[in-house]
Image (cartoon, rainbow, N blue to C red):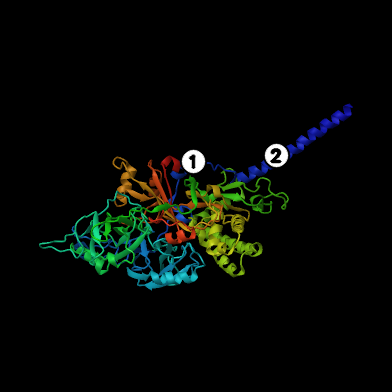
Amino acid sequence: MKKQIYWLIGIIILSILIIGCKGSKSTDNLTEIENSGIVVNPKTDFTEEEKISLLRNDIRPIQYNPIQKSVKLYAATTSGKPCTLPDDQSDECNSEEDDPNAVFQPVKPVYSNGFDTAFVEKGKDEHLWFAYAPNVSGIERIVWQVSEKPFTLNKETWETPTGLLSSGEVTINKGEFEIDFSQIAALSKKNKTKNPVYSLDTDPRYFPTQRKFYIRILALDESGDPIGTPDKGLEITYGYPYSAKPTNIHFLFPLKSGEVPGEPHEGEFPNELQDFPEHTYYSDDYVAWFFRPEGFPKNTETIYLQISKTVLKNGIDDWRTPPNMIHEIKLTKGSTEFDELSNPNHAIPIDFNSFADFPSACYVRAVALSPGKEPGTVLASYSKSVKMLLKEDRESIIEETAFPEEISPEIPEVKLLEYTPIRTEAYQWEYYYKVIHQPTWSDISAVFNNTPNANELVPELPVGTVIKFEEPKPEKKTWYEEAWESIKSFFNDIKSFLADIVNWVSKTYTDVKMGLINYVAENFPLIPDSLRDELKKALETMVDYGLASIGIPPELPNFDELTSMGTEYLAATALDAAGIPEAIVDPSDVINMTETLGEEVDKQMSYSANSAGPNPLHWNFVRLNPNTLYRPAFMLLQIRNPYNHPTPTGFLYGNVTTILTNIQGNANREFLYTHYCNMTHFKLFKPVNMSIPSLQPGQSITVPVIFQEYTGEAYQGCSTALEQNDFFKLYTLDTASQFEFTMGFNLPPIDEYINKHDLPVNNGGYMYKDTQRIIKFENIATQKLAM
């Protein structure tokens, strides 16, 4: 019995020794790795304050790394040729003083190098002027390019960037050139898949749609290569303006009219234009009544005179679809009727007897449309209404007062799920890597003089382990000391390193595209063969630039982390672009297809992103650590269809604004105010403009809106580009940033809606109520820095 006990004790002791030896060996391995300068599981839980305090402008993340532009490009803020080149002063311009008594004071075009300050309205003057100024020496040629896709920083493909529509050449000296965007839009239309979201052929009164075009200018050397890194250029908004929300209280302006029918005149029995609220009109009067709007904004470009059988509302969009409208007159800038309003005696005739079915009562009003504060928006100002009563026999008046019934269109429900602030990159983020597959000893054999079995896995480096390259400790004279010199050299050439990352991302995108296209071909039998090519194009566009549409630049190395938040949105947008939902009979099949494709998008993104990325030792088992990389701020919206039929397509647009207050006595605020042209309202992020796909009954998707810093670009009216350090001064101010977004939808004209839903006859007619979804919230500095 004692022998058995001793034997058991011996076995236990031997086991402990063996385990201890193994543990010691593992510890020795880890020690040797770390002594070599490779830190396993380094500290990564830095606070945002710590990271911001250590920011380096010379090596910001890929899309925010400052680029020295070889040629500065400027765009006119509106149609027409600016009277001076940028930074020039002209007596001709200065002599054109504004007349304070003038009826009209049109907005004059000026040159701006702001990223998104130019808007070209379809159907009006679609020419836009650009100016340029060389910024480096050694230039042999200067070329410009226009694309329907955002430009990337890829220097190798600068001649044939994806989405290129047109290009041209200008002289080497600074100057100007003009582009006709009606031709650009026509070229773009040939390339488009069937996509109602981006179509500009819809009625702009009911569904104002916009597209983005991108223009850049490059300086070429004597070899025909770009000098420096090609930048991303400027963004031009093209299409129809969205309605802007008034920033101030706008009172109703007068709509003057004569006391009696006939032209206004003076004399013994004058018919002067006055502010009458009501008139009586006789059926045997065959003379037109004259109306004159006055007191509208001086920068008005379009005026509507609208006549309706019912009282009209004055909301931001109520001019688009007024109910029971029986007549409308449109006056546009440049027409005789419009320009003649500068004459105080000029008025617009309306012949009520010319209407086939004139009611016993109607209402006349004027709507003045002027450019909104933001490019691509229009501000509606309204006049008082004049009530017109019809008297048949000059003895009695039969007045029918009817009011329209408001109906809520069946648009999807929208809910703000979360807002997440910026995750700033860690100091020396380029030194942090994550293990994407566990290496063998042969994979890292160069680290050690004596290695274990080459085919055995390194237990200290399982998948997910974070490592950091650091300088080896002075007392350890290993091979790594020499390797460290090459590593330092690797990071010293930061431009090449960033270019390598861009190329790596480009390759992974190509893998994603092929993977998705092959997956759809094998797993989606419900898709009609006639639409498979359309879906292929849509998927390629989604992967290349659908990510950019939600704010993920095509060269961001942690794109998979961001994409995973919106895979169903991307899938739904791609299916919509290809026209798939309309071709599938059962809505549940569309929902399943969207979910399945979304899961595959996520899978392909993760698979491709987990390929070995550029690193100083050219290891095939690591990529840059996503958690120490920069991640933009973002918000997540949930969009749900609670109805029993598909919802209309739509669009989301909006801005994030930081307002400077309490400027005096605060060094940062005073600097920002004076350095940036005495501005108090700063765009914190670049404007958002995204498409919203149609949703099937019961379908719900998450839409990520990823915000890009408004850095390296100027604001409208100020030629100074916002610098990175100044952005973080804005970002960390103890003041609230205003987040305001509008989601509009492609609603049919009200008559179509009435017929489709078999609504009963209503004397007052019908009008839409709540045609938009508004997302508004504030975010203060302490929340911006929250992890």
Mark 2 closeness class: few <14, some 14–19, many ≥20 residues within 10 Å:
few
Question: Is label 2 or label 1 in front?
Answer: 1
Front-most of 533 and 484? 533
Residue 321 placed where, x, y %?
Answer: 38, 59
Counting every numbered tag in the picture gives 2
- Which residue is disc 1 drawn over? 47
Residue 411 placed where, x, y %?
Answer: 48, 54
Quadrant of the image containing the N terminus: top right
- Mark 2 or 1 closer to N-term? 2
Q: Can residue 746 be seen in this view?
A: no
Q: Which residue is drawn at 41% across and 42% down?
A: 780
- Which residue is disc 2 drawn over? 24
Instruction: Say which amino acid is labelled 1.
Output: Thr
Instruction: Say which amino acid is labelled 2.
Output: Ser
Front-most of 559 and 549? 549
Q: Is residue 269 visible?
A: yes
Residue 613 placed where, x, y %?
Answer: 58, 56
Element assignment for label 2: helix
User: Quarter of the image holding residue 378?
Assistant: bottom left
Q: How far apart are marks 2 and 1 (CA)?
A: 35 Å
Q: Do the residues labelled 2 and 1 touch (CB within 8 Å)?
A: no
Left or right of residue 677: residue 772: right
Mark 1 closeness class: few <14, some 14–19, many ≥20 residues within 10 Å:
some
Element assignment for label 1: loop
